[in-house]
Image (spheres, rainbow, N blue to C red):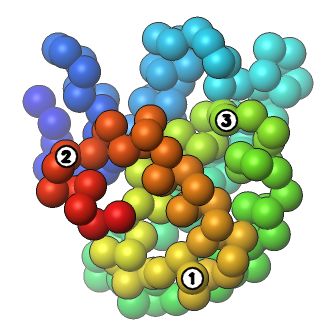
Amino acid sequence: MLPTAILPALIERDVVLYEPRIIAEYLDERFLHPPLLPSDPLGRARGRLTMFRIKQEWLDRLQLPDQRDTARAQLRHALAESEPLFRASRFFLSPEIGLADCMLLPWLWRLPAAGLFWRELGMGIESYAQRLLNTPLFQRTLSDAERVLV
């Protein structure tokens, strides 16, 4: 059973997962190619550290309903400062898609609903979001109603 108000969620056959890191690691283990974490231990550790920081510094900011306006302002500032990270590579800090992208994409998709628009956060973020959210792979994850919103 899916707990209420926990996003993103992955529902596949009889599996329901709802923690971004758990979803991302499940995807990496379920679909072996392309690998979403590097094969070397140091690269995997760095990838996991990146995911930890994304969750702690960005994803968790909008989870505090009583502090939503303050959290939104802090998140807007943190993302604007981090905008060069989205321009550094084709994917988030990598030339190939990785677990960080799997965590970021559903969250970026929902940012406008929280009043944070990609263009306001910088061209690197807007370009990254538009490029990856409009891929057929991501579009297949959306319902027909969600697809209209792109």
Residue identifier under label 2: 143
Q: Is residue 30 above or below residue 101?
A: above
Q: Give the CA distance from mark 3 to mark 1.
A: 22 Å
Which mark is first along the chain, 2 or 3? 3
In the figure, residue 140 lies in which quadrant?
top left
The local secondary structure at tag 2 comes to loop
Residue identifier under label 1: 119
- In this orientation, which residue lies closer to the viewer: 122 or 62? 122
Residue type at mark 3?
Ile
Q: Give the CA distance from mark 3 to mark 2.
A: 23 Å
Q: Is residue 48 left or right of residue 102?
A: right
Residue 97: mark: 3
In the figure, residue 10 lies in which quadrant?
top left
Residue type at mark 1?
Arg
Q: Residue 97 at x, y = what percent?
A: 67, 35
Q: Residue at position x 17%, y 14% from top? A: 14
